[in-house]
Image (tube, rainbow, N blue to C red):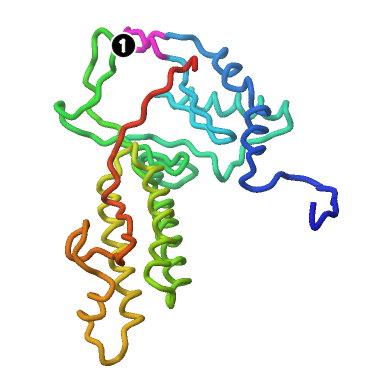
Amino acid sequence: MDKGIFEETDSGTPQGGVISPLLANIALHGMIKDLEKHFPNSKKREGGSINRRFKPRFIRYADDFVILHEDYDVILQCKKLIAQWLEKVGLELKQEKTSIRHTLKSIKQDGKIVDPGFDFLGFNIRSYPVGKHHSGNTGGKHPRIIGFKTIIKPSKKKILAHHEAIKEVIKANKKAPQAALIARLNPIIRGWCNYYRTVASKETFSSEAHILWNMLRAWTVSRKKKKTTLNKALRKYFSNGKHGLWTFQTKDCVLYHHAETEIRRHQLVKLEA
């Protein structure tokens, strides 16, 4: 509806509309269950031991999904099976967004060296080689040290996008009052931090706070009058507060700092829920 006049929609759904993930869930319903049927629960390894978790792990969010397995051939088989399943319902894999990665080491794919780890839903998932005291283990009754630790962080792409979002707000409010700038920045910073607060984001939050300080310093300098010294100009907008001597604040509002976000590990949801 546009000004009371109805116009027929040719195709697509509104970007960001709640109907999109629902339709994706309907369209892809049964895909994971169908794929799991092709693989046994356990399989004997070459050395004689039994891999009791042979079935690939599938993680899906709307139309985004990841398949995890230690065997490269199984991954290739999954890719083929998914392509066949999608074809039946009139869909296909987007090749430029589909890739095979190793979480621990670089691999060669399509003639290019691909860095370890992968991005999913704005997070970077990667394993790092560590000593036995920091290493993860296989779990179960007889846990075995695996020699690496998997760490989830905000992806570099999303960090840069966050920088741009803040930069745009500061640029759009060059002549606005300080309180107005704080009011526009706080929801952006708080929302971004809340999204990443459940993973290893402490270092990222600390560096983001420093980058933001430099951006706000530049904002202050751009408003400085010719005869005013830099220190005096900075003291007009920065004062002693909850973030120390250089707190960006007015009498009524304080800028939210990335670094003040507390890291809280997410609660695992039962698979049956």
Q: Which residues are magenta?
A: 43-53
Q: Residue furthest bottom?
A: 227
Q: Quadrant of residue 221?
A: bottom left
Instruction: Give residue 141's position: percent from left, percent from top.
Output: 26, 7
Q: Residues within 10 Å of mark 1 (few under 14, many from 20)?
A: few
Relative to 137, say whether 239 is above or below: below
Q: Is residue 81 left or right of residue 76?
A: right
| Label 1 residue SS | loop
Identity of the residue drawn at 35% across and 8% down: 50
Instruction: Give residue 33's position: percent from left, percent from top.
Output: 58, 17
Q: Is 47 contained in the magenta span?
A: yes
Q: Is residue 250 left or right of residue 231?
A: right
Numbered label tally: 1
Q: Residue under circle 1?
A: 47
Instruction: Give residue 244's position: percent from left, percent from top.
Output: 18, 60
Identity of the residue drawn at 21% across and 81% down: 232
Relative to 89, say whether 101 is above or below: below
Identity of the residue drawn at 26% across and 36% down: 128
Looking at this view, is 60 or 239 the one in front?
A: 239
